[in-house]
Image: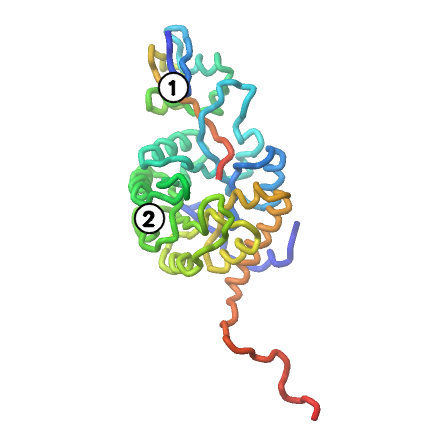
Amino acid sequence: MDVVINGERKQVTPGTTLLELLKELELDPRAVVVEHNRKIVRRPVLSEVTVSPGDEIELVHFVGGG
Amino acid sequence: MTTAVETLRDEPLTIGGRTFQSRLMVGTGKYPDMDTMSRAIEASGAEVVTVAVRRVNLDRTKGSSVLHFLDPKRFFLLANTAGCYTAADAIRYARLAREAGFNDFVKLEVIGDEETLLPDVQGLLEAAKVLVQEGFKVLAYTNEDLVTALRLEDAGCAAVMPLASPIGSGLGLLNPLSVRTIKRRLHVPVIVDAGVGTASDACLTMEQGVDGILMNTAIAAAQDPVAMAQAMRLATIAGRRAYLAGRMPRREVAVPSSPTRGMLD
């Protein structure tokens, strides 16, 4: 199924949790903040939220800025 | 680098219940490379460093978090909402930043115009009210308008950050009177943010009596960012000292410094 991650369409296996998604993308859950369909998902519950077709996921972190 | 002047006493800067020894805050953007950034920040003596919230690059060969080059235990990370043009966007970015788990401070920017990057004060006030309600310590980037600054203070902002001149312009402090007036009238700390170009700008800004100064491009875009960071550190201290010392009154006629009596016939 397709989901949109950071504006890019990606194929994921149905039933994938957000934590599994981060692992697949080789991202450290402690270094990323996850927004799932415009709602922030806290780290402790990343393993409890599964993604559905068409979901919009934003993965953000801190970059240089003024 | 130690300077004797630093042994003079001053109250530390307290914002939203947090105390900081350095009155200079620095950004982390636009450096030629991350090593130069780390060394410049070190040389600046800053404790508060600003960061931006952006998408992770899913291609892991490109781009990484600024935190790989900056120890979050040593520096106080102040997330900004740079690039946001609406209150709703700024609120969204602030919430994401807080979720990173470092603190509940945010440097709130709501930009109103692409060419000048001047703030949208209506959006700014709207976002500030919401974020204060949500428990954020809001440091609001605004123009040098007293009435807006007063409204931001009323809204519960922890600090108000009037600009010296437009972001990244390096034009220096264009309106010392307005900045001084804002400082005189507000109770919360006033931190001048944006527009300084070189050390004399930082010094002149601090001489107005403001509580601190935040800069990024002036250091990052200098020919030698590390040396400029040192200069900014000293200029910030010098300006603060001069303000505390109290300058002599201006006179439009000369007054001799040497005795007029005892001259030879």
Q: Quadrant of residue B224?
A: top right
The local secondary structure at tag 2 comes to helix
The residue shown at (48%, 12%) is: A24
Say which of B204 and A15 sits in front: B204
The residue shown at (36%, 12%) is: A50
Read off the residue under disc 1: A57
Q: Is residue B254 visible?
A: yes
Residue B238 is labelled as: none
Read off the residue under disc 2: B152
Q: Quadrant of the C terminus of chain B?
A: bottom right
Badge 1 sits on which subunit? A
Q: Residues within 10 Å of mark 2 (few under 14, many from 20)?
A: many
Say which of B253 and A29 sits in front: B253
Name the colouring of the figure: rainbow
The answer for how far apart the CA atoms under marks 2 and 1 are is: 33 Å
Q: Is residue B21 visible?
A: no
Q: Count the marks: how many?
A: 2
Check contact, mark 2 vs mark 1: CB within 8 A. no
Q: Amino acid at mark 2?
A: Leu
Query: In the image, is residue B110 above or below residue B212?
Result: above
Say which of B197 and B114 sits in front: B114
Q: Residues within 10 Å of mark 1 (few under 14, many from 20)?
A: many
Q: Amino acid at mark 1?
A: Ile
Residue B117 image point, x, y percent: 41, 42
Say which of A7 and A22 sits in front: A7
Left or right, B35 with reference to A61? right
Badge 2 sits on which subunit? B
